[in-house]
Amino acid sequence: MENKQQVNELVGHLFRHEAGKMVAVLTRVFGFKNIEQAEDVVHDTMLKALETWKFGKIPENPQAWLYSSAKNKAIDILRRQQLKYKIESDISYLLKSEYTLAPALNEMFTENEIKDSQLRMMFACCHQSFSPEVQITLILKTLCGLSAKEIGNAFLSNEDAVTKRLYRTKEKIRGENLTLDYPGADAMSQRTEAVLKALYLMFNEGYNSSHPEKLIREDLCEEAIRLCILLSENTKTDFPQTNALLAMMCYHVSRFDARLDDKGMIILLKDQDRNKWNRFLIEKGNEYMQLAATGAMIHDFHIEAAIASVHANAGSYEETDWKLILEMYNSLFERTANPMVDLNRCLVLGEVEGVEKAITELLKMKSLSENCYYNTTLAELYLKSGNKIKAKEYLGKALTLTASIAEIELIRKKIKQC
Amino acid sequence: MEKFMYLFRGGAQSQALSPENMQAHMQKWVGWMKSLGEKGIMVAGEPLQQTGMQVSGNKKVVTDGPFVEAKEMIGGYLIVTAKDINDAVEISKDCPIFEVDGKLEVRPVQKMEM
């Protein structure tokens, strides 16, 4: 009985993670343009698992059960529909003969081949003919096992919009005859860059969004990290910038439990309880940081990770090496010319050279005047300098620039302090 | 105590559930089944495959099927013991199948009276 109870507990997200793996594997088997066929097989497999296991008999090795079920369904389809003669993929020649069909499928479901398929799928999802939104949508759908509804929910968009986007993307895959082949050695670093960029955006969406559901944000971050680890583990994609991105993600996620209060309100860095920071993740971040410190190239991710590292490893807000952080922001802004980077740079400037200096610099930035965060930041600095009237003015403006309930509440609370 | 059979129709098959939803739903079922077991009222129960064969008439004609809509398909059965049909109906109301728009039929098992 004890044993049965243990078996009855499945690892969290098992279905979702395995669905993602199986879609990658089967898409490699059926070919990228037949991705829907792969998704159907996976859906049927998960449904069969649900219908069978719900009676209380969860197999001892659920993963093996799923793989064998999916494999058999795939073999059926390949035989029945004569699909095997039409498939164009790196293993299609193995599917044409009964001698090699089943062994080839077995091989595809081994750990190494699964990872290989996931990697190919990542490159395919981040193909240059897709916009960043499409890339992230495809990653979440095919590699992370999220439904259109869940993706829509994560991006505060709706299911229909996501479904339409996926439909158009699949037409494009067929139309342009895109494949799951690896980019050539000469294009590898450039294509990896695109994948990293997409994971970076996906992570940021999870980390910075004002989505009311904390779980959804954590999921996006967790998925981005999971996929980035895959890249780091593979010699083809294990670039210094891969590890730098991974380090940055670990440092940020280490603060997850400290950055929101019980009501889901954002707690500023200064006020966070550093005992709640996850030491394990900070150590992981430090490890990846070591791995990132090779080669002659400095990537933006290196600088971002380094900034996060200084924060994560500082004993307190006051002990933070603000001068070092300011230098890093200066060079990051020089490289990116990103106004949001400049905004954060000004905040750090305030710590180093005083609030007045930061306000002067911020007021020079015109491009962000309609940005909510810009206005709350200015208000924060005015409040610090004792100018409550100005602070209230900017908070009032910020109120008109956000739709997020959590943010509106936070701003209202601040206004009361003025 | 009397025996009752629950026949499950539709539910997850007819819904577009995500893998995450399916896992959550499955775990609810496992919990419900466990609670029936703990109460000592579960007699038997198995899931059924989606299709099989039909044998009919005095000519014993064998055909594939049945092919019915997902929401009408019997996905499994369960036999429980309960005081009476009302009790059996009450027990069935905790079944997770209702969360995915499924149906459940409660049928008393006919006793053979000598």
Image: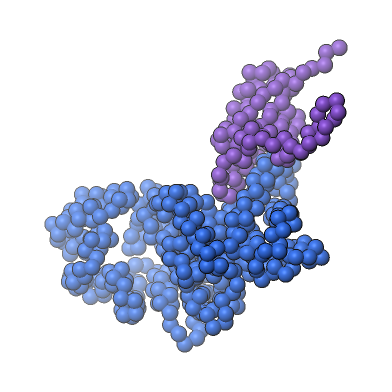
Q: Determine whether A413 is above or below A32 in the image.
A: above
Instruction: Place residue A268 in its image quadrant.
Output: bottom left
Question: Quick one: which chain is blue?
Answer: A
Instruction: Place residue A274 in its image quadrant.
Output: bottom left
> Which residue is rendered at x = 58% and y = 53% of the image?
A16
> Which residue is rendered at x = 72% and y = 58% of the image?
A82
B52 sits left or right of B86 in the view: right
B89 sits left or right of A256 in the view: right
Q: Which of these two is toward me, B23 or A127?
A: A127
A78 sits left or right of A176 in the view: right
Residue A325 visible in the snapshot: yes
Instruction: Place residue A84 in its image quadrant.
Output: bottom right
B114 sits left or right of A238 in the view: right
- Chain B palette colour: purple
**Residue A309 at x, y = what percent?**
43, 73
**Residue A135 at x, y = what percent?**
47, 64
Q: Which of these two is toward me, B2 or B105?
A: B105
Q: Determine whether A165 is above or below B74 in the image.
A: below
Residue A282 visible in the snapshot: no
Q: Which of these two is toward me, A191 or A268?
A: A191
> Which residue is rendered at x = 61% and y = 35% of the image?
B71
Tally of marks: 0
**Residue A216 at x, y = what percent?**
46, 53
Q: Which of these two is toward me, A399 or A75?
A: A75
**Residue A324 at x, y = what percent?**
34, 79
> Which residue is rendered at x = 55% and y = 68% of the image?
A178
For the N terminus of chain A, the image quarter is top right
